[in-house]
Image (cartoon, rainbow, N blue to C red):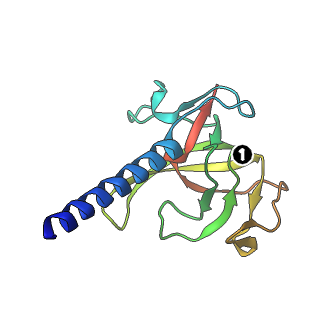
Amino acid sequence: MKTRTILAVILIGAALFFIAYRYLSEVTSVKRDADTGSEKNLDDSTKTSKSGQLDYAEKILIVNPKTDLNLRICPGTDCDVLAVLEKKSHVVSTGKVQSSESDNGAILSWQEVRFESGSYCLPSEMTRDGCLNWRTDPPVSGWVNAVHLRLQN
């Protein structure tokens, strides 16, 4: 009986790991989308600045087509959210990048961007079911986790 319990726990753990892995693979994968055209990961670019970092200044970037994205007042998950950018929205990089450490010790790359087109929502208008009032009015600027951005070709 004890062996069966241990085996069941191992199988459930493996299944949960597989589900989490598939979800994260889908969220961060780059796929061709009819609405956004051809896209590629930021890491695929070869243009670098004098400091050796990738340079995306004034490039149009696309928010991951799978998830909405928090636009923050500073680079870090502990910074307040200014707006939630709708998936597939376009932003323009200011060229400023910064890294921060997350609560679990992971190093996150942050990109300062300016909202260009698409929609965004104010945090006060977000509910569990989504945004109550998507906005397209004057641009907002802030910091986003760069893993959720794609270069537009």
Query: Residue 17: x, y in percent?
Result: 35, 54
- In the rendered image, residue 101, in percent from the top left (x then y), is placed at 36, 60
Residue 129 horizontal side relative to residue 133, left or right = left
Q: Residue at x 46, y 24 (%)?
A: 46
Q: Give the quarter of the image for residue 88.
A: top right
Q: Residue at x 39, y 36 (%)?
A: 51
Q: From the viewer's perspective, is 116 left or right of 43?
A: right
Confirm whether residue 96 shows in the render. no
Is residue 19 or residue 53 the one in the foreground?
A: 19
Q: How many marks?
A: 1
The residue type indicated by label 1 comes to Ser
Counting from the top left corner in percent of width and height, residue 53 is at 41, 36
Closest to the observer, 115 or 148: 148
Q: How many residues crowd around disc 1 within 10 Å: few (fewer than 14), some, or many (20 or more)? A: many
Side of 90 where 74 appears, left or right: left
Residue at the limit of the structure toward the bottom, as seen here: 124
What percent of the width, then of the height, locates residue 65? 64, 43
State the residue position of label 1: 89
